Amino acid sequence: MTETSSRSAQAAGQGIPGVGGHLDALDGMRAIASFTVLVYHVASESGAMLREGFIGALLSRGDVAVSVFFALSGVLLYRPFAAAALDAGPAPRARAYLWRRAVRILPAYWLVVVVAMLIWSRDHLSDGWSWLLLLTLSQNYDLEPWWFGLGPQGLAQMWSLSVEAAFYVSLPVLATAMAAFARRAGDDVDRRARRLLACLAVLASTSFVWTLLTYYPQYRPYLNPWLPRSMVFFAAGMALAVVMVWARARPDGPAARFARDVAASAGSWWLIAALAYAVAASPVTGTRFLGIDGVWSGLSELALYTVVSFCLLAPAALLPPGDSPVRRLLGNRVMAFLGRVSYGVFLWQFVAIYAWYGFTEQQSFTGGFLANLPPITAITLGLAVLTYRFVERPLQRLNGLVRR
């Protein structure tokens, strides 16, 4: 038996989370985040999140699920890079990694862009520049767009996918630089891991610095949907990836003890996430609708959303092999199915919302949150299932990404 396989067997026997392969509990987290975003957008369109009271306040911060998505990407995509940095093995090839990412997200996204533009933006179908921006996920960088808000009608949520794409492109460069710094510590895994975490702390701080720069010397709102402002969420997920690899490499080390403690106290971590969410629903993060009031509201939102994301994901990411209540809750068949189609749920939700409002001849902000949520969810889920069946899954098979 090789040293690596010996360590893996030892780690598995001591309840250490896996480093490679599929993490079924995170499917459930992805599903929860996806449908939370949908609920948030229906609450926004119906006006429910603008109502006074506790429920309206909670609905108004459903966009925290976007930070959960970012942290999920940090965990899942940085794992192999972290493993290479700590084990001195080969890192993923950048070209193959970027190709897989492109095939995973772009075709289904392009389909939704075409549908939304044909339905609601026909006046701009001949605008080649708009097509170039949208199809390359560069719309966040247009400082004077023709659309109102974060994107053309039916595509407003895609700003976050643009941020994701920027992270995908940046990750190989960031991971290479961090690995080079970590390897200067020699062969000591503990020292390498601490150096990686130090790098991630610096990376996370860029979000707070970026927020300050967004407001000074004058407010520049177009900087909010750029990658640096959301980097803290990705860094939080990347830190979990480092802990996973570190625990696997040193089953008797501090990361392994931390992982076991987190997995054994999932309820406590989720309670912390719930409390942070409740605080974020207060005026400390600014007004309820579309944005933040000032620099302190922006910094508070970053800090609280990071706590929510990290504390939600940690028990699922650090879950050891074997049966457990957390795995039964997040990794069951229903959650696994919803996790598989969650990307389509994210992509189609505004198309479903506007199509339903148009069909029922409703006006925005006129109420009906509870009446509108079930049909919109059904439409969104149906479109997501079709997209997964006929677009995503065939391409995943082509890329060898489907678990066999």
Image (cartoon, grey):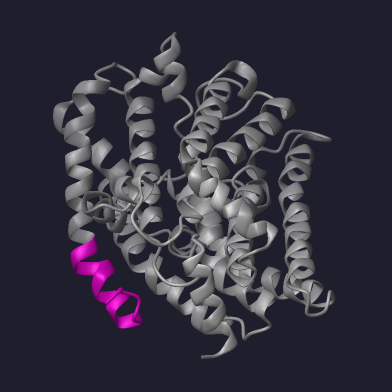
Q: Position of residue 328 (x, y in %)?
A: 30, 49
| Residue at point 77%, 62% (across, down) | 194
Q: In which quarter of the image is residue 193?
A: bottom right
- Name the residue furthest bottom: 1
> Viewed as shown, does residue 85 lie left or right of 109?
right
Q: Where is residue 52 in the image (x, y as percent from the top left)?
A: 44, 8
Q: Where is residue 308 in the image (x, y as percent from the top left)?
A: 55, 37
* Residue 233 can be seen in this image: yes
All told, the count of numbered labels is 0
Considering only vertical position in the picture, is 300 above or below 212? above
Give the position of the C terminus as an image quadrant: bottom left
> Viewed as shown, does residue 384 lie left or right of 107?
left
Q: Position of residue 233 (x, y in %)?
A: 60, 48
Q: Which of 250 and 214 is in front in this view?
A: 250
Q: What stretch is highlighted in magenta?
A: 388-404
Q: Which of 126 and 118 is in front in this view?
A: 118
| Residue at point 39%, 67% (across, down) | 22
Considering only vertical position in the picture, is 3 above or below 326? below
Whether the magenta-drawn stretch holds residue 73 is answered as no
- Name the residue furthest top: 52
Q: Taken as a whole, is the magenta stretch helix, strand or loop?
A: helix
| Residue at point 36%, 19% (across, down) | 47
Q: Which of 15 and 172 is in front in this view?
A: 15
| Residue at point 57%, 30% (across, down) | 291
> Viewed as shown, does residue 337 lie left or right of 208?
left
Q: Nearer the viewer, residue 149 or 89?
A: 89
